[in-house]
Every structure is written in C-alpha cells, then in structure tokens.
Amino acid sequence: MNKLTIERISPAQFAQMGIRKWPVWEKEIADFPWHYDETESCYILEGEVDIVTSEGTFSFGPDDFVTFHKGLDCRWIIRKAVKKHYKFF
C-alpha cells in the first residue's frame, strides 16, 4: 500500500473540503527525517519538495494535494521554501 498520495483536486473539491480554513505551515529550504503518527492531508501553495520513502522519491509543488498516511517514515527535502494548508486525521 502506498503511504503517500499526490493528486490534483478541482476548485469545487478545494471549496467543499474547506481547505482555505485549514492552518498554514511554512518552512525554508531544509532536509530532515519525519514520521507520521497520524494521517495528514495538505494542499501546497508554494514551494518544491522531494519526499524520500522506502517506495521511492516523490516530488510535488504548488496546487498538489498530498496525503501522508499514518505510519509513513520519510525524509523531507525542501528545495524551494514551502507553504501549505494542512490537516491531520
């Protein structure tokens, strides 16, 4: 099972999910390990990120909707400062 999904959502889905009301997280260029104790969904507003997992390397940027599933161990490589709306489930 993939523990990371990257997709595009429509403006209608964006509005229906209330993403604009989710908190915002920002981070400068960085490289760090991370473990997800909960599932997180996020909508990328700005930046360029590579996520390295046991399944490979995944890249995403503006307008991508990313879900990090509970239990994922990964390495974040932020190549361009990131700004995202996020929500834990």
Image (cartoon, grey):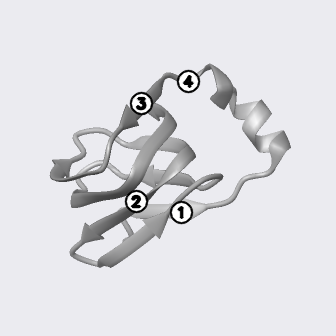
Asked if marks 1 and 3 touch (Cβ < 8 Å), the reply is no
The disc label shown at residue 50, or none: none
Question: What kind of element bears circle 3?
Answer: strand
| Circle 2 crowding by C-alpha within 10 Å: few under 14, some 14–19, many from 20 | many
Q: In the rendered structure, which amino acid carries the disc numbered 3?
A: Trp
| Circle 4 crowding by C-alpha within 10 Å: few under 14, some 14–19, many from 20 | some
Q: In the rendered structure, which amino acid carries the disc numbered 1?
A: Ile
| Circle 1 crowding by C-alpha within 10 Å: few under 14, some 14–19, many from 20 | some
The disc label shown at residue 49, or none: 2
Which residue is under mark 1? 6
Asked if marks 2 and 4 touch (Cβ < 8 Å), the reply is no
Where is residue 5? Give x, y as percent.
Answer: 48, 63
Label 2, label 3: how many angstroms apart (C-alpha)? 14 Å
Asked if marks 4 and 1 touch (Cβ < 8 Å), the reply is no
Q: Earlier in the sequence, mark 4 or mark 1?
A: 1
- The quarter in which the N terminus is drawn is bottom left
What residue is shown at x 51% (from left), y 53% (from top)? 66
What residue is shown at x 55% (from left), y 46% (from top)? 46
For residue 16, side relative to residue 46 (left or right): right
Extreme residue in the right direction: 12
- The quarter in which the C terminus is drawn is top left
Q: In the rendered structure, which amino acid carries the disc numbered 4?
A: Trp
Which residue is under mark 3? 25
Where is residue 13? Give x, y as percent.
Answer: 77, 42
Residue 72, image quadrant: bottom left
Extreme residue in the bottom direction: 56
Where is residue 86? Give x, y as percent.
Answer: 48, 34
Which residue is under mark 4? 22
Is residue 55 placed above or below 68 in the rendered structure?
below
